[in-house]
Structures are given as C-alpha cells and as structure tokens.
Amino acid sequence: MDVAKITPAIGAILTGVDLSAPLTQTMADEFYTQLMEHQVIFLRGTDLSPAGHLALAESFGQLDEPHLLYPHLEGFERIVKLENDSGAPPDTNTWHTDLTFKRVQPFASILVARVVPEVGGDTMWSSCYAAYDRLSEGMKQDLEGLEAIHDMGDFRNSFPSKEQLDSAVSRFGHMIRPLIGKHPVTQRKFLNFNEAFVTHILGLPTNAANSLKTWLAGHMNKPEDQLRWRWQAGDVAIWDNRCTMHYAVADYLPAYRCMNRVTVIRDARAPEN
C-alpha cells in the first residue's frame, strides 16, 4: 500500500489496494492506522461490491441501524442509497458532522461512488483538529469547559408531516457535548462544533450564544483546514466522523448522482470498547 497525503491538514490517497479481494485483518488494521493519521482516506476506482462494502465497514466496528429517512440498497438494509437529481435535490450541502445529536455519535462512514455527474458533485472535508490548533491560547482557555446543545437541526425539514417530526424529536431529543473534544484514540484535541446540529451554547444568553456560534462557523470555514474531492465512479472515502466535518457540494443539478454509504457507530479498536 502506498500513501500520498492530499493536504498538510487532512486526507490521504491509498493505492496498491485491491478491494475486490477478500479483506484480511492486516489490511483492515492498516486502513484503521491510516484513518487515525489522516482523518479521511480515499481509494480510487475500486470494484467494491455491496457485500464487500459491508465487510469493510464491519472491520471498523458496529454498524448503524437502518436510516430513519433515507432509502437503502435493495437487499442491504445497512447500506444507505443516496440518490439525487433535479427531482430529489440533496440536503447535505452544509458543513456538518454526522448525527452529533444522537446519544452515540457515529465513529466513521464509508462512502462509495456509484454514479457521478460529469461535472460537479464534489465533497469537501475539514479537519476539526486543525480548527482547534489555529485557536489562540486565550480562545482555547475561553472555550475549554463550555458545552453545546446538539439537536436535529436541519433534519427537521426532511419529515413530511408534523406527526413524524414530533415523533423523531421525541425519539432523539438532544445531546450535550463539550466544545473542545478529545479524540479517544489519538488523544488530540479538536473543535467539536458544526453549524447543522449545534443550536445553543450552555451557560450563555441566546444573543451571546448566537454570536459565538457565528464566530465558530467562520473560524472553521478555512481552506487551509479542508480538502475537496472530485469523485470518479468506484471511488471509496472513509472518514473519522469524530474529528472532521464534511460538505456535499450541490452544484450538479439537474444531473444524477448516486452514492452508497455505510455508517459505523462504534469503533471496535477504541479504548472504551
């Protein structure tokens, strides 16, 4: 396996890997090592079957339950089928960290490009490690100990009826998480904030919380912390959802784009497991 960094802050491309062959423990461990180092890793032009997709995801840990809203691939209820075109526009074109409002925040996602538009449809990732490292020492001290409320945020717009929305809000509620997180494996600190799901900063009046949220969103939207991936059919992306944000660029409509995603909710190699 050869590893080439994409940017100094985040991302690496792995080559010399055949994902059509059965996954070995050695290969799975190497993927994990590179993921911890680079936060998001890519493999170009693979021939990864749905069964292979699941096997790869299971090598990282426990898989998520079937998605509440998105359809799944026929015969594979744990593989989300993300299809978008002019009749079904995407809803992920905002900086977000997946499902931070859930009691167990997902560990990782594995995304396979099945059909991509001729132009557009890139995905961007951003390093929350780098965002923390760029904070001034004074701001690090100010944010240490503060906690944020994460709830369903933009997902409220995805429910077709008030009754379904009320049911989902009752089911998921919210989570309170520290603004400065510490990765359970690398022990690196990261800025634990995303625009999509953070609704309030505990202990602050609404105006002050909103001002801090606006400042954090601007601070974290820095090209030096980011990479932008131009998809080709068969590409695979694996990212650590605990220390990254991502943004699916919705510039390709009315063209069609189809991706398959599996989410890993628990890291089998993390100390708490």
Image (spheres, rainbow, N blue to C red):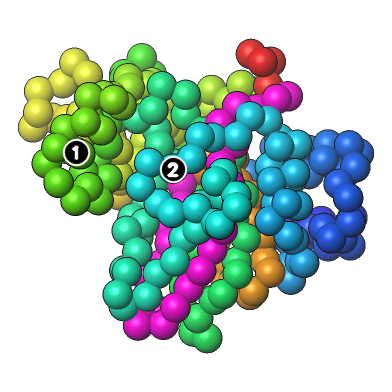
Up-down: is 15 above or below 165? Answer: below
The x, y position of residue 263, in whole percent, is 56, 41
Does residue 171 appear to the left or right of 206 in the view shown? Answer: right
The reply to whether residue 96 is visible in this rendering is yes
Residue type indicated by callout 1: Leu
Residue at x-position 35% and y-position 64%: 90
Is 167 within the magenta? no
Q: In which quarter of the image is the N terminus?
A: bottom right
In what element is the residue under mark 2?
A: loop
The magenta region covers 245-269
Residue at x-position 21% and y-position 31%: 167
The x, y position of residue 54, in whole percent, is 69, 46
Does residue 170 appear to the left or right of 56 in the view shown? Answer: left
Up-down: is 163 above or below 48? Answer: above
Q: According to the image, label 2 marks what residue? A: 67
Of 140 and 21, the residue lying toward us: 21
Is 247 within the magenta? yes
For the image, the number of numbered tags is: 2
Q: Quadrant of the C terminus?
A: top right
Of 262 and 184, the residue lying toward us: 262
Which disc number belongs to residue 165? 1
Residue at x-position 35% and y-position 83%: 254
